[in-house]
Every structure is written in structure tokens, then in C-alpha cells.
Amino acid sequence: MGDCSKKVTVDFSGGVWFHLRMKDVFLDDERETPPGWHRCHHVYEVIALIKAKQVRKLSLDHDLGDGEKTGYHLCLWMVENNKWPVEKPVVHSANPVGAMVMRDMIDKWFQKDWKEVIRARETGKEDRRKEIDRRQDDKTVKVLRRKAAVPR
């Protein structure tokens, strides 16, 4: 395995520049590692590299052997923690269902904070509820005015 890392300068601390060795990471338990990629067999290895902000590209397999966490578990972790490689991950799994679920999750959540999305949705729901209440109040007022205008 050759040196697959790329030297990249990144600002993570508001003005202090770090020089990191970014890796192109290949998560798989069976396939041959492509030239220039860093091989990981387990999800926990990739998580450690992502936490250290050392992953530029990520290629994922779904099934990683009996009893092992899957590429899907890594996708869940990335979404839940909003920690991602620099570039959008790709999926190379032969498991069609697992690959589809992981791709969908990546497409929907890549570099998006799910907590912010939920907050925005909840705020939107609250705004919609207020608008419905306002419209209902307007209808009630109109009905009351009509009743008041009708001579008895």
C-alpha cells in the first residue's frame, strides 16, 4: 500500500491553519483496495479518521462480514454526528438494498445538520398551525359579523 494521503491546508479553528494528510478511504472487507486508497476493514477505523478530519474521499461497502457493523451504520453515525469526509461519499456495495439505502441517506443528509432540519420543520409546523388558527379566527369573525348584520 503506497502513500495515498494528500497534503491539504484547512482552517478548523478560526484563523489557525493546520496541514493535514487527507486520505481517500476504502471501507470493505473483501475487495482489493484501489491504488492510492487507504483500506479500512471496520466502521470504527473510519469513524476515527473522520473525527480526526483526515478523510477526503470515502467509498463504502455495505456488508463487512458476520457480526460487524455495516456501511449503513457508518452512514447513520455520519448523519447523527454531522461529521463527513470533505467530498460526498460514494457506495460500491454489491448489496442492492443496502447500497440504495446508504445512497439515499447520503444524498439527503450529506453535510446537513439533521437537528437544524428538524427545528426548521417544527418551526414551519408551528407557523402553519398559527396560520390555520388565524384563518379559522377570520372565518369565525365573518360568521359572527353576518349573524350580527342579520335583522331579527
Image (tube, rainbow, N blue to C red):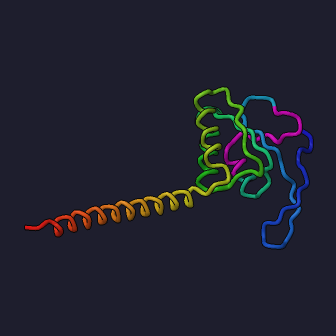
Q: Is residue 78 left or right of residue 33?
A: left
Any part of residue 70 in sight: no
Residue 9 picture location, percent across and down: 88, 61
Most foreground residue, 87 or 66: 87
Q: Toward the viewer: 85 or 142?
A: 142
Q: Residue furthest front?
A: 151
The residue lying at 52 percent from left, 60 percent from top is: 120
Dividing the image into 4 quarters, which one contains the C terminus?
bottom left
Tag count in the figure? 0
**Residue appearing at x 88%, y 48% in the figure:** 5
Quadrant of the drawing holding the N terminus: top right
Residue at 80% x, 49% y is: 56
Q: Position of residue 112 (x, y in %)?
A: 63, 54
**140 drawn magenta:** no
In-front residue for pair 96/138: 138
Give the residue furthest to the bottom.
15
Q: Position of residue 18 (x, y in %)?
A: 86, 65
Which residue is the extreme one toward the left? Answer: 152
Residue 92's place in the image compared with 135, above or below, is above
Q: Residue at x 82, y 33 (%)?
A: 33
Residue 81 figure quarter: bottom right
Choose top left, top right, bottom left or bottom right for residue 35. top right
Apparent side of residue 101 relative to residue 151 in the rendered image (left or right): right
Residue 7 appears in the figure: yes
Q: Is 127 on the left or on the right of 151, as rendered?
A: right
Q: Which residues are magenta?
A: 33-47
Reply above or below: 43 against 63. Answer: below
Left or right side of 22 for 49 = left
Question: Height in image: 125 above or below 46?
Answer: below
Q: Nearer the viewer, residue 51 or 146?
A: 146
Residue 24, percent from left and from top: 82, 44
